[in-house]
């Protein structure tokens, strides 16, 4: 006899992988426009919202994929509380994005690779485990970890090869001394 609890976990894991693969395609789009390849998908209230990193494209220091997905969902749904939401993102969120997820009452976060320099889901700090926050986000880390990390490494290796510049620059401002 099959175990219905295990079947539910397996279905959850399969969905996590499928959404993370789609987020990786969004990340590739970000890289093509000269942004760091990070993609995010937010599922809430039967709707799906897609975003990618756009800090260079806009230019806006808060235009992280996670922030753009949260803003799009809130504007479309007409509410800031995104209870029941699952956010899929290719890289561990920073403190700003983690704080926004707590504020929006996101239920679940699924991410690919860790960010040892700025990750706020356990790598550098853990916003979600802090006793100071008023909402708990269930975190699933390391889904497609090797693939998402490889995508980021390839992007930065190409930038180094191009002399510190994005090899396929999108709309960027001229250098300022």
Image (tube, helix red, strand yellow):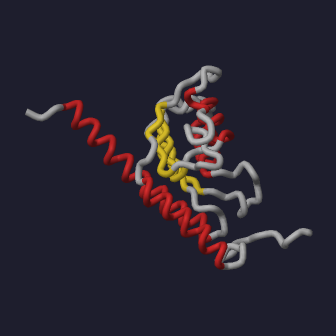
- Residue at image position (60%, 20%) is 131
- x and y, in percent, of residue 97 in the image: 64, 41
The quadrant of the picture occupied by the N terminus is top left
Comparing 148 with 62, the one in front is: 148
Q: How many marks?
A: 0
In this view, 48 is above or below 59 = above
Q: Toward which corner of the image does residue 75 lie, by quadrant?
A: top right
Q: Residue at x 53, y 33 (%)?
A: 106
Residue toward you, 74 or 97: 97
Give 4 or 78, whichever is nearer the viewer. Answer: 4
Residue 35, compared with residue 45, is above or below; it is below
Residue 53 falls in image quadrant: bottom right
Residue 52's spot in the image, x, y percent?
59, 56
Give x and y (percent) for residue 100.
Answer: 64, 36
Q: Residue at x 55, y 27 (%)?
A: 129
20 versus 35 height, above or below: above
* Residue at 60%, 30% in the rendered image: 102
């Amino acid at each position: 006899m099959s175990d219905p609890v295990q079947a539910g976990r397996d279905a959850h894991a399969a969905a996590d992988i499928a959404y993370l693969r789609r987020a990786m395609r969004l990340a590739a789009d970000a890289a093509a426009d000269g942004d760091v390849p990070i993609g995010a998908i937010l599922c809430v209230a039967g709707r799906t919202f897609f975003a990618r990193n756009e800090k260079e494209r806009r230019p806006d220091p808060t235009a992280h994929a996670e922030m753009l997905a949260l803003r799009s969902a809130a504007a479309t749904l007409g509410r800031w509380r995104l209870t029941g939401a699952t956010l899929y993102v290719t890289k561990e969120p920073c403190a700003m994005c983690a704080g926004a997820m707590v504020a929006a009452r996101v239920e679940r976060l699924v991410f690919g690779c860790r960010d040892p320099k700025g990750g706020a889901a356990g790598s550098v700090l853990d916003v979600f485990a802090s006793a100071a926050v008023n909402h708990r986000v269930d975190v699933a880390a390391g889904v497609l970890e090797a693939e998402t990390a490889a995508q980021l490494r390839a992007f930065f290796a190409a930038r180094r090869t191009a002399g510190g510049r994005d090899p396929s620059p999108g709309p960027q401002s001229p250098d300022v001394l």
